[in-house]
């Protein structure tokens, strides 16, 4: 195996963050299918071609750099959160590209809409067969734009389809997005499993009314209901959750969202994650029962949106063994096996091939924010471990 070039790798990473640069630190604003996202993918396709790979855009906007010989698929995604970090996903794509330059038989993946503008890891879900394209096309973002409308912006780039069966497995390097590695002073995390996730939108309908003349005991105020739901949910979840379980209300739309009006409708995202499928089901019961109780107590109408989610996934032992051996050889005693609390494209790809993941530390445990960062030295260590691990399985 030739040695990966750290300077070229870091240069490519920094060039990529220029697409959609926020102007605040190293942050990026590159949601799926926006101008910056499409421009970034076209640049990545060019770098793939320069590396001797054959770039292919599929109809979903996923980008592949294909090797002429069979082997593993390595990569991640290049879209970002609305206020995203420069390494989330991008690290996996650029490190894969550098490994493909030095390890024969490696193909590179850059999946679309991992960050969920339209759902949950939508690009890899469609490619892996977890979601039909027709179903995906009907999904809407927060502004009411459908995925079908958004992906039409990339129609001119579509150049073919890629069969998952051509690959022997999938490996994804990623920042940890948490505080474990940085807190322990460790350099590498070899992932042993990815948590499952459930995500849906809940809507409460009350009565819009005048904020000055409506007595408090006569109000059907949906914001007060949401506040009560959140407090009661936290109490109820303690009966079923473990310290590793998490739940989040991350997006709230209040109507009409005006100073002098008692709000009459609220829709909010409800997401929960855990490594056990049965516990995810028990958490769902708590969510639904608690919302139903609050709605009944406050004379509100309640509706639940479609449930989106993925099951917990165990990593492949052969692939993780190769990554673990590489980690021990390069940073002996400074790595650990660990779960991933974040969702990744590897979850979808586990439907059709063996998968594995590798983590590098996140400074301060911060991600999904402009402050997201990792020391260059740790990025290079991750690249070296990835390249060594991949060379053991090709």
Image (cartoon, rainbow, N blue to C red):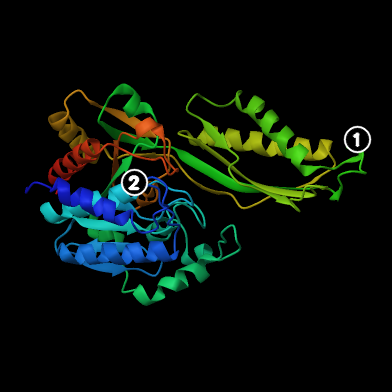
Q: Earlier in the sequence, mark 2 or mark 1?
A: 2
Task: Name the side, left or right, on which 156 lies relative to 254.
Answer: left
The residue shown at (40%, 59%) is: 112
Question: Between residues 233 and 134, which one lies in front from this camera angle?
Answer: 233
Q: Secondary structure at mark 2?
A: loop
Question: Between residues 181 and 309, which one lies in front from this camera angle?
Answer: 181
Please say whether residue 72 is visible from this viewpoint: no
> Height in image: 346 above or below 111?
above
Q: Give the class, few, some or many, for how many residues have Cα within 10 Å of label 2's Cα (few <14, many ≥20).
A: many
Task: Name the side, left or right, on which 26 lies relative to 293.
Answer: left
Q: Secondary structure at mark 1?
A: helix
Identify the residue under disc 2. 87
Residue 161 in the image: x percent, y percent? 32, 69
> Height in image: 110 above or below 286?
below
Marks 2 and 1 sit apart, C-alpha to C-alpha, by 50 Å
Residue 394 in the image: x percent, y percent? 14, 49
The residue shown at (56%, 35%) is: 247
Identify the residue under disc 1. 217
The residue shown at (65%, 37%) is: 287
């Amino acid at each position: 195996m030739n040695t990966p070039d750290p300077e070229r790798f870091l240069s490519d990473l920094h060039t990529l963050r220029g697409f959609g640069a926020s102007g605040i630190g190293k942050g990026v604003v590159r949601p799926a299918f926006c101008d910056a996202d499409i421009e970034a993918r076209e640049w990545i396709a060019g770098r793939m071609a320069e590396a001797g790979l054959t770039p292919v855009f599929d109809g979903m906007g996923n980008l592949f750099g294909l090797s002429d010989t069979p082997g593993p698929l390595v990569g991640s995604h290049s879209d970002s959160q609305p206020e995203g970090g420069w390494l989330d996903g991008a690290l996996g794509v650029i490190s894969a590209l550098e490994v493909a330059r030095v390890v024969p038989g490696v193909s590179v993946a850059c999946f679309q809409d991992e960050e969920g503008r339209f759902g949950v890891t939508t690009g890899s879900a469609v490619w892996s067969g977890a979601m039909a394209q027709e179903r995906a096309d009907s999904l809407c973002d927060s502004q009411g734009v459908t995925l079908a409308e958004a992906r039409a912006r990339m129609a001119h780039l579509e150049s073919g389809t890629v069969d998952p069966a051509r690959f022997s497995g999938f490996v994804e390097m990623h920042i940890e997005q948490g505080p474990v590695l940085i807190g322990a002073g460790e350099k590498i995390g070899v992932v042993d499993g990815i948590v499952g996730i459930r995500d849906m939108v809940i809507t409460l309908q009350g009565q819009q009314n005048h904020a000055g003349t409506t007595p408090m005991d006569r109000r059907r105020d949906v914001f007060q209901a949401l506040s009560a739901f959140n407090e009661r949910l936290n109490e109820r979840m303690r009966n079923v959750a473990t310290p590793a379980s998490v739940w989040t209300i991350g997006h709230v739309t209040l109507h009409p969202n005006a100073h002098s009006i008692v709000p009459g409708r609220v829709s909010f995202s409800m997401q929960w994650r855990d490594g056990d499928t049965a516990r995810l089901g028990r958490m769902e019961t708590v969510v639904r029962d608690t919302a139903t109780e609050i709605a009944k107590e406050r004379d509100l109408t309640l509706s639940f949106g479609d449930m989106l989610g993925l099951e917990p996934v165990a990593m492949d032992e052969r692939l993780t063994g190769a990554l673990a051996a590489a980690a021990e050889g390069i940073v002996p005693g400074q790595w650990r096996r660990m779960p991933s609390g974040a969702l990744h494209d590897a979850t979808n790809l586990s439907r059709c091939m063996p998968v594995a993941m590798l983590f590098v530390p996140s400074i301060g445990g911060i991600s999904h924010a402009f402050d997201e960062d990792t020391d260059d030295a740790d990025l290079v260590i991750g690249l070296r471990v990835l390249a060594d691990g991949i060379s053991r399985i090709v």
